[in-house]
Amino acid sequence: MKLVYFSWVRERVGKTQEDIAPPTGVMTVADLIGWLAARGEEYAYAFENPKIIRAAIDRTHVPPETAIAGAREIAFFPPMTGG
């Protein structure tokens, strides 16, 4: 699956996107964030506060408990404000 990073998540990870194959135990967005945070210092920094990270699967915003099976693209971004 393809991961896409936006804003300060992208800056902290150090890349705009990557293709990954998470282990079988990674089943939800929250699991994926936890797995990514353990991949290295830059990921740990990007996902240090997982409760504020927003995600979209195939361009649809989803909550952390959403299953990732079958996802083609998962995007991660910080909270957005309007105005």
Image (spheres, rainbow, N blue to C red):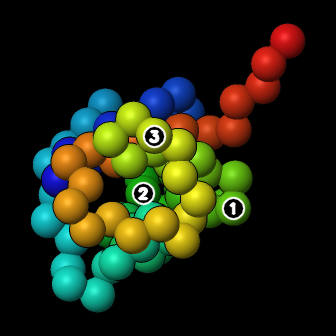
Classify residue 42 as left or right of residue 83. left
Q: Picture coordinates of residue 6 (x, y %)? A: 46, 31
Question: Can you say whether 4 is above or below 25 in the image?
Answer: above
Residue kind at label 3, given as amino acid type:
Thr
At mark 1, the secondary structure is helix
Q: Earlier in the sequence, mark 1 or mark 2?
A: 2
Q: Which mark is residue 51?
A: 1
| Residue at x 34% of width, y 78% of height | 27
Near-viewer residue (32 or 62): 62
Q: Earlier in the sequence, mark 1 or mark 3?
A: 1
User: Farthest top residue?
Assistant: 83
| Residue at x 56% of width, y 65% of height | 64
Mark 2 is surrounded, within 10 Å at the Cα level, by few (under 14), some (14 to 19) or many (20 or more) other residues, namely: many
Question: How far is disc 1 from disc 2 in space, using C-alphas?
Answer: 15 Å
Q: Quadrant of the C terminus?
A: top right
Question: Can you say whether 35 is above or below 14 in the image?
Answer: below
User: Farthest right residue?
Assistant: 83
Mark 1 is surrounded, within 10 Å at the Cα level, by few (under 14), some (14 to 19) or many (20 or more) other residues, namely: few
Q: Which mark is residue 60?
A: 3
| Residue at x 42% of width, y 57% of height | 43
Query: Which residue bears the numbered disc 2?
Result: 43
